[in-house]
Image (cartoon, rainbow, N blue to C red):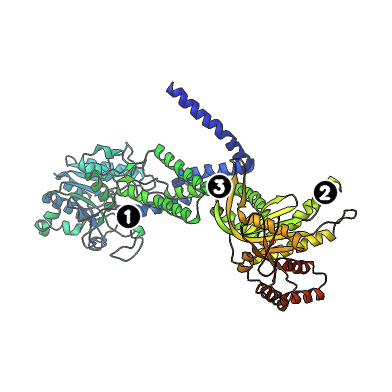
Amino acid sequence: MGGSVKDGSLAGRWRALQPEIRKTLKQIGATRLIITALFLVLGLVFARYSWNIMLARDAERALYDVRALLAAPRVETDQRITMVTFNEETLRLTGRRSPLDRSMLARALTQLDRMGAKAIGIDILIDQPTPEDQILIDAFRTMRTPTYLGLATNKSNPAFMTYEQEQFLRDFQAKTRPGNVHFTSIRLQADQDGVMRSWPDQPRDLPPLLANSLTGAYPEFRSYQGAIRYRLPVDYQRPVFDKLPVELIANPDVLDALRPQIEGRYVLIGGNIPDVDQFVTPASAMKDPQTGRVGETMIGLEVHANLLAQMLDGVMPRKIPDWGLWLIALGVVTLGALTATADMSFWRLSLVLLVQLAAVVTVPFLWQFKGVDTIGLPVFGWLIGWIFAYSAVGTAARGIGSEQRSFAQSALGKYLPRDIANDIMKNPERLQLHGEKREIYALFSDLEGFTKLSHQIEPEMVAFLLNKYLDMLSETVLEHGGTIDKFVGDAIVAFWGAPISRPDDPDRAVRCAIAMFEAGEKFRKDAPEGVPPIGVTRVGVHHGEAIVGNFGGEGRIQYTALGDSMNTASRLEGANKYLKTKTLVSDTVVAKSSLSFFRPMGRIAVSGRSTPMMVYEPVPNFSAAVVQQFTDALRRFDDGDQTALTTFEQMLVTNPDDKALENLIERLREVGPGGYNALDK
């Protein structure tokens, strides 16, 4: 029963997700979806098979070489293995280059047998006759030390070994009986780029590899084809393996002196001749401490010595199984896709990207140091796969986001100034999802007599006029950086100071109020023929605190401002009717504004406020001297100077059409110095 409940719950969640999934797929679109899926598949292929993809495999090999080199153990000289080599000096002494002087080899073998070598491996092909053959055969016949002679076949290496050469070699070995001489495979296989990184394959028609033959143990290495474990010397003056010239070993006078470097050791004999049997290794990418050159190679004999040392140490780096590589590739691609859809700030995204990059870089190194065979580990492919997934999903998400942002920006642009809308789109956290107390500049406008007008004309004309009027005034608000709160019939409610405040908000609000009145006047003059006269636009502006934020239910919210400031602005708009003004601002606005064209219109008390306030009318067309004269006259009146009224009356004579001034004189006579008018609205 418990299982069925769980299944039902999962099924319910799936059903709940389906509409959202369908919506997302619809927003992505078929073409974009196919392209995104294609890039994800390509990313997955790269993240799994980059070792097999041209160019990418070069990067993978280079990355592996760095890992192998850094993880290579630092060791003192290996006391188990000694190399005996034919070098350039040997060739000079013997006067022979190819084939090598076999009498010299015979004398060296005899000495090694006397010194008590544990086993001897010969990385030299005896594939053609020389005058010294019988000397070498006689030496082989007397060997007590197990000796392994290198064999290559025409089948396994047709480019370097003919059938006749193979037959000569087999016949030569047969003549060494009853000596302790056996065949061994000296097969080495470099990667396609010529670098020796892995153990060679060991065909069953060949004898065991030289390392396997010398030890006669470690059967698990008979089929091992993993990474070669190279080692580096602690001090380059003390190499990993002792390397002695064959002519020195062949000299019987130094038998006792050299015995400590031979007795009980595996001895490998081969060439150390430039341009012959030389191999590039991961260490070739670094500067050789002795020569100072980059690209130094390793002789094949030393590669065999490294294989032997690795076998003796039982080091078989374990490979990550195929299913594990697929799982990692899928995880990398998924991580790239999820990162592309994550909604994070730039700094947080940068941190996430750095952490992911650090993981991709460091994890393979950690595995290498922990003994994991990282050949075939597609590290570069992970990066490419991640980039493919991030780019594909990110592009699709940005496509959806761009459409959504365009829609949201368009919607915000109807209520907010363009710069604020753009800023909120970039920094959504600036638009608080809860109410907050802010100081704002509230504006309330109204078109006089429009309600009465709407009953006198056709509804279509009402809609046309109202939309045109609100559009004109909305543009005016937005041009001055205001936030449109709401439309109430023909009235517009707006404010400054939220969601983003600016130092010049009071000036913007005042200039907007003036511009709205002027826009209203233009609207009146441009009214269509046959429309009754349209009233003036009245505006009130007040500064104070308000609660600003998103308010509403779960399904519908509105960004708005609540509080006394909004109510006071509305009362100021209404006060214009009684004071015969067109625009009124409160004393709190004047105190914050840097503008100087305000003339005081006396004190009023409005509904909802317990104390009177001084109100002002913006008069940008008045000179500063006139505004100052007006202000001084009212101050004198409040101080009890009755001659101030005479000053106002003289102003009225000069401007007989100034109804607001006429009204002010009447009110001052009525209330006296320091008095105020109480308005119903």
In 3D space, how far apart are the residues under numbered discs 1 and 3 (Cα atoms)?
A: 35 Å
Question: Residue 543's spot in the image, x, y percent?
Answer: 62, 61
Task: Residue 446: name its quadrant.
Answer: bottom right
Residue highlighted by disc 3: 392
User: Looking at the image, is 122 positioned above or below residue 521?
Assistant: above
Front-most of residues 648 and 568: 648
In 3D space, how far apart are the residues under numbered discs 3 and 2 (Cα atoms)?
A: 56 Å
At horizontal 59% and vertical 64% (from top left) the residue drawn is 502
Whether label 1 touches label 3, CB < 8 Å: no
Question: Residue 164's spot in the image, x, y percent?
Answer: 34, 44
Q: Does 643 sit left or right of 73 as displayed?
A: right
Discs 1/2, front:
2
Q: Residues within 10 Å of mark 3 (few under 14, many from 20)?
A: many
Residue highlighted by disc 1: 69
Give the residue type at disc 1.
Leu
Give the residue type at disc 3.
Ala
Residue highlighted by disc 2: 454
Disc 2 is placed on an element classified as: helix
Disc 3 is placed on an element classified as: helix
At horizontal 43% and vertical 52% (from top left) the residue drawn is 357
Discs 3/2, front:
2
Q: Residues within 10 Å of mark 1 (few under 14, many from 20)?
A: many
Q: Tell me the number on the disc at residue 144.
A: none
